[in-house]
Image: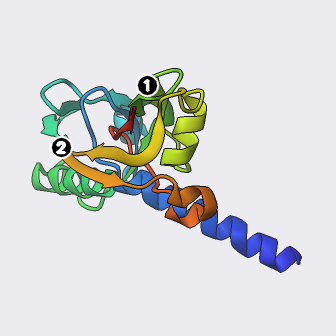
Amino acid sequence: MRLLLTLLLALLSGHQLFAQAMATMRPGDTFEIRLGGVPTDLAVEFNIQYTVSQEGTVNVPNVGPVRVIGLTPPGVEKLLQTRLVSDKLFTHPSVNINPSPNSRFITIGGGVRQPQRLVWTPDLTAGSAIQLAGGLTDFGTLKNLKLIRAGKVTVFDGRKFENDPAADPGLLPGDQIIVRQ
């Protein structure tokens, strides 16, 4: 029983890390850079909190503005490692990006009691977002829920995840859920 519980927890944490890693950078997102493979006194200059500008860039010391919008954290890591080497700052840097979870949101509206912007967490699903928004209004329906992600609209039947939690779609930062009324 203990082994089963341990495996289940490992699987869930892996899903959360995967979801966070697949979320693309947007203006206003914040993250920390941890630089390794370089002298500690030089790494300190880079190991700070960054905020993605409205133009989609971050200003990295000794590198300048770097366009990160639309990239996943692993993509930003690779880009920065390449830039640090191509700019001849370091020969073998290791870049780690740690997104700040409280800087990412989803939006839920339509037939919910409290339409709002919710802080994104890796385990947030459409069903849990509806519950966090106070549940359905008297006229709200789970039929034909709209999920808007990166400008693409997906319509799905939310009644299915009432009986099958696996059918409840996970959300990514920037997603919008619109509940039909």
Q: Quadrant of residue 2?
A: bottom right
Q: Which mark is residue 95?
A: none
x then y, percent, for residue 68 = 20, 42
Q: Nearer the viewer, residue 156 or 16?
A: 156
Residue placed at 60% from the left, 61% from the top?
165
The residue tagged 1 is 117
Type of the residue with mark 2: Gly
Residue placed at 11% from the left, 55% from the top?
86
Above/below status of 13 relative to 177: below
x then y, percent, for residue 69 = 19, 40
Residue placed at 47% from the left, 33% from the top?
140
Q: Nearer the viewer, residue 68 or 139?
A: 139
x then y, percent, for residue 134 = 60, 27
Q: Dot 1 surroundings within 10 Å: few (below 14), some, or many (20 or more)?
A: some
Above/below status of 143 relative to 181: below
Q: Dot 2 surroundings within 10 Å: few (below 14), some, or many (20 or more)?
A: few
Do callouts 2 and 1 mark residues in contact (Cβ within 8 Å)? no
Q: CA distance from mark 2 to mark 1?
A: 17 Å
Kind of element beneath mark 1: strand
Kind of element beneath mark 2: loop
Q: On the rendered structure, is 57 left or right of 120?
A: left
Type of the residue with mark 1: Arg
x then y, percent, for residue 146 = 33, 44
Q: Nearer the viewer, residue 87 or 53?
A: 53
Residue that lies at the very extreme toward the front in this rendered image: 139
The residue tagged 2 is 151
